[in-house]
Image (tube, grey):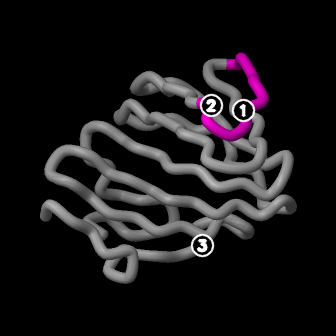
């Protein structure tokens, strides 16, 4: 799978205002989100995977292990494995999220999707 056609990605809206496209490489899971300004906040949660957020456009507030920071275009947040984190849109935003290792159960989708 050296190339991924955006039309072939799994797509959905796992939370109100979070329109996403998802795909898996051999070892990683990727999500491309278009986040509405009035999107529901991504509740505090944790998972086994390390997760890297790259903000492409707009502003979000990310809290990692109780420390919150506003992130804008070009900013990156690295969430260590098993660390509580949450996200709230401050403006309409776009973000690319990478999880390692694979995160087969994507938010809002059944296992193995």
The residue that appears at 59% across and 50% down in the rendered structure is: 95
- Binning the other alpha carbons within 10 Å of mark 1 as few (below 14), some (14 to 19) or many (20 upward) gives many
Cβ–Cβ under 8 Å for marks 1 and 2: yes
Q: Is residue 42 above or below residue 76?
A: below
Q: Nearer the viewer, mark 2 or mark 3?
A: 2
Q: Secondary structure at mark 1?
A: strand
The tally of labels here is 3
The residue that appears at 78% across and 29% down in the rendered structure is: 70
Q: Which portion, as a residue range, is magenta?
A: 66-75
Residue 52 lies left or right of residue 62; in this view the side is left
- Binning the other alpha carbons within 10 Å of mark 3 as few (below 14), some (14 to 19) or many (20 upward) gives some
The residue that appears at 45% across and 56% down in the rendered structure is: 31
Residue 17, percent from left and from top: 73, 67
Q: Secondary structure at mark 2?
A: loop
Q: Which residue is mark 1?
A: 71
Name which of mark 2 and mark 3 comes first in the sequence. 3
Q: Dividing the picture into quarters, in which one does residue 33 lie? A: bottom right
Residue 103, percent from left and from top: 32, 49
Q: Which residue is mark 2?
A: 75
* The stretch drawn in magenta includes residue 103: no
Q: In the rendered view of the protein, which quadrant contains the C terminus?
A: bottom left
Name which of mark 1 and mark 3 comes first in the sequence. 3
| Whole-number angstrom distance, CA of label 1 to CA of label 2 | 6 Å
Q: Which mark is residue 13?
A: 3
| Whole-number angstrom distance, CA of label 1 to CA of label 3 | 22 Å
């Amino acid at each position: 799978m050296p190339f991924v056609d955006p039309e072939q990605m799994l797509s959905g809206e796992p939370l109100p205002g979070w329109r996403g496209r998802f795909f898996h490489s051999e070892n990683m899971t990727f999500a491309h989100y278009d986040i509405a300004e009035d999107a529901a906040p991504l509740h505090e949660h944790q998972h086994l995977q390390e997760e890297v957020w790259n903000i492409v456009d707009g502003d979000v507030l990310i809290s990692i292990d109780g420390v919150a920071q506003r992130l804008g275009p070009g900013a990156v947040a690295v969430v260590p494995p098993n660390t509580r984190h949450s996200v709230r849109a401050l403006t309409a935003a776009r973000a690319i999220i990478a999880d390692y290792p694979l995160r087969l159960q994507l938010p809002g989708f059944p296992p193995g999707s």
